[in-house]
Amino acid sequence: MAQFLLAFGTFIALHSIPAIPKIRGALIGRMGHGSYIAAYSIISTAALAWLVLSALSLDYVEIWQPRPWRAWPTFVLSPIGLFLVLAGLFSRNPFSISFRKGVEADAIVAVTRHPVLWGFLCWSVGHIPPNGDLRSLLLFGGFALFSAGGFLMLEKRARRSLGPAWPLASSQTSVIPFAAAINGKTRITVDMPMAAAMLCTVALLVWLLGGGHAVLVGADPLLFLGV
């Protein structure tokens, strides 16, 4: 348990860096934006792998028994979450997490100004029902709480960075997905980053369901459905 808590603490600390302008700015100033993104991605992936492996090393303590119907939230929410994470990372987004710089926002921001957080939240919440053991609840529940807490931090960062431009810019998007479009403040379109995210999502899902998920974590999600 100590290793799991240390891994989770490291994961949270690493993913808090983008929300702290002084630290993020200092790193980008020294390394350059491209090198910062590359290094951050590699270190974050390593931290995530450490966290998952440390969770798998914990003793299995069952809380509820698996049932086929409990797999459906995963099959519904995980593809949505994966698409939102990829679309958010591929797109320019002055409000939130992105691999790309730019003041002008790409099309995914019309859906929500925090697609990566929503995607990670969907993915983590979707993995809770079929995994009825304590270690899975700690892992995915912790991810969900961390994602939910990130909205406030990134909203504060966006307000600070955009300054006088915040009122107009934020009025054309929303934190809640599709809220701005429903209220007529923006229009949903599809651009190249969103199209690329869709294609990557389909490819990753085919790989994961074709055996990739079992290779990564030793579990075949189709077995939950009895397929």
Image: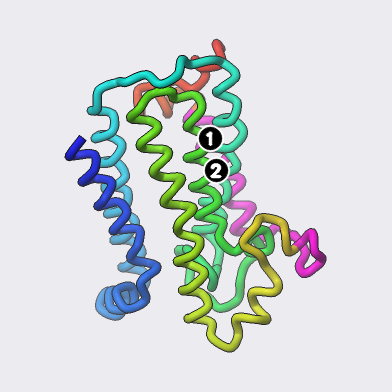
Residue at image point 51% right, 46% down: 121
Q: Is residue 123 above or below residue 22?
A: above
Give the image location of residue 156, x and y in percent: 48, 73
User: Which residue does the numbered mark 2 point to in the structure image?
Assistant: 122
How many C-alpha atoms fall within 10 Å of the one at disc 1: few (<14), some, or many (≥20)? many
Q: Residue at x 48, y 67 (%)?
A: 154
Residue projecting furthest to the left: 2
In the image, residue 52 sits, relative to residue 188, either above or below, namely above
- The residue at the point 76 percent across, 61 percent down is 181
Q: Amino acid at mark 2?
A: Cys
Identify the residue under disc 1. Answer: 126
**Marker disc for residue 115:** none
Q: Residues within 10 Å of mark 2 (few under 14, many from 20)?
A: many
| 56 drawn magenta | no
Q: Examine the rendering and report whether any part of residue 65 can be seen.
A: yes
> Can residue 200 be seen from the camera position used here?
no
Identify which amino acid the numbered label 1 is placed on: Gly
Can you tell which quarter of the image residue 227 is in?
top right
Residues at discs 2 and 1 in contact (Cβ within 8 Å): yes
Name the spot of residue 187 as percent of width and height, x first.
Answer: 77, 64
Q: Secondary structure at mark 2?
A: helix
> Left or right of 44: which side holds 186?
right
Q: Is residue 24 above or below residue 50?
A: below
By secondary structure, the bulk of the magenta-drawn segment is best described as: helix
Query: In which quadrant of the rendered image does the N terminus lie?
Result: top left
Give the residue at the far front of this rendering. Answer: 63
The residue positioned 30% from the left and 51% from the top of the image is 11
Q: Which residues are magenta?
A: 181-208
Using the numbered discs, state the Cα–Cα distance from disc 2 to disc 1 in whole angstroms: 6 Å
Q: Nearer the viewer, residue 13 or 81?
A: 13
